[in-house]
Image: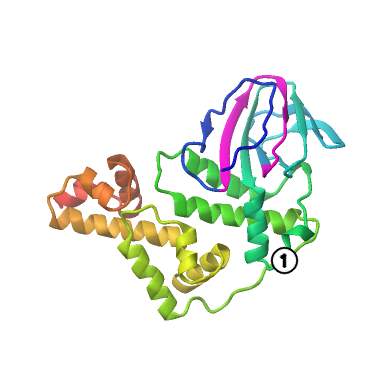
Amino acid sequence: MSPVNHQTESTCLPILSSQSRGWENILVSQFQYPPGEATCHFSDEHSVCLSLAHRPVRSVHMKGSETQTGLYRKGDISITPAKVPFFARWDDADDFLEIRIASCFVQGIARETLDINPDQFELLSTFRMRDPQLEAIAMLLLAELQQDNQNNRLYVESLSNILAVHLLRQYATAKPDVPVYEGGLPQRQLVQVLDYIHDHLDQDIKLADLAALLNMSQFHFCHLFKQTIAITPYQYLLQQRIERAKQLLKHTDQSIMDIAFACGFNSHSHLSKQFRQLTGMTPTVYRAN
């Protein structure tokens, strides 16, 4: 992600951050601040903040010329568009998730997925509002942030696309019409994508790579892929990695660590966790049966 201008009077660092994860176009961080105040200005990113506090926190928020004072409760959301200066002061210890998504990425989604001129819209500032769908996306990103999983780029990119489309649909000055795609992928295109996934299981497959195979937007691709085989590209990739791990466990004497790397997992524990979730047993037990 490109650097942004971010000034804050607080010296607290996030307790969790995707800064070192290699996630593209999105930065997800969880902060736990003592009472205090901060000033931020993100020149190239839109910011979405979700309150995780277990008790209401009295806060003053200023965005540009707008000011609001009130109690932020768990699940309350605030959106600050790029280039809008933001000041906050809070009276109690605070816990929140901050999602920064690159404005150029959102513009690209507007142009490629929704076929609208990105210069003809802007995002709206919001204070202390509720949005169950946006909260669900944020919590999925937080759950992924909490996992010790480096090879999750396809999943994070899918969530980033969903987030960008949701922001455009719900919080843009001009509401775009999201196209409806029906019929799924033609068999030839589906086989092309499945073959690519099978041939690159040991690599960190990107959503952009799969969409580029068919010369379509990432959002469009995800929608048609799921229509065709009833699961997301990430779910299919995970299933195929586990199937390959099963074959290697049964028919080779490779160590579980080597099998993990050969199947695109970044550690023994990562393979074991995903393997158990999908099969109900650990790789060691599966090999012994």
Report whether 110 appears left or right of 67.
Answer: left
Residue at the (21%, 46%) spot, across then down = 258
Report whether 30 appears left or right of 260.
Answer: right
Residue that carries the numbered disc 1 in the rendered image: 116
Instruction: Where is residue 202? Give x, y as percent.
Output: 31, 54
Residue at the (15%, 48%) spot, across then down = 254
Instruction: Where is residue 12? Give x, y as percent.
Output: 60, 22
Main secondary structure along the magenta-highlighted residues: strand
Residue situated in front as seen by the camera: 248 or 47: 47
Instruction: Where is residue 179? Give x, y as percent.
Output: 66, 71
Quadrant of the rendered image containing residue 223: bottom right
Report whether 283 appears left or right of 133.
Answer: left
The magenta segment is 25-47
Q: What residue type is labelled 1?
A: Ile
Q: Vertically, is 192 above or below 165?
A: below
Q: Vertically, is 139 above or below 71?
A: below
Q: Is residue 165 visible?
A: no
Instruction: Where is residue 252? Give x, y as percent.
Output: 13, 54
Q: What element carries label 1?
A: loop
Q: Residue furthest right?
A: 65
Q: Is residue 5 magenta?
A: no
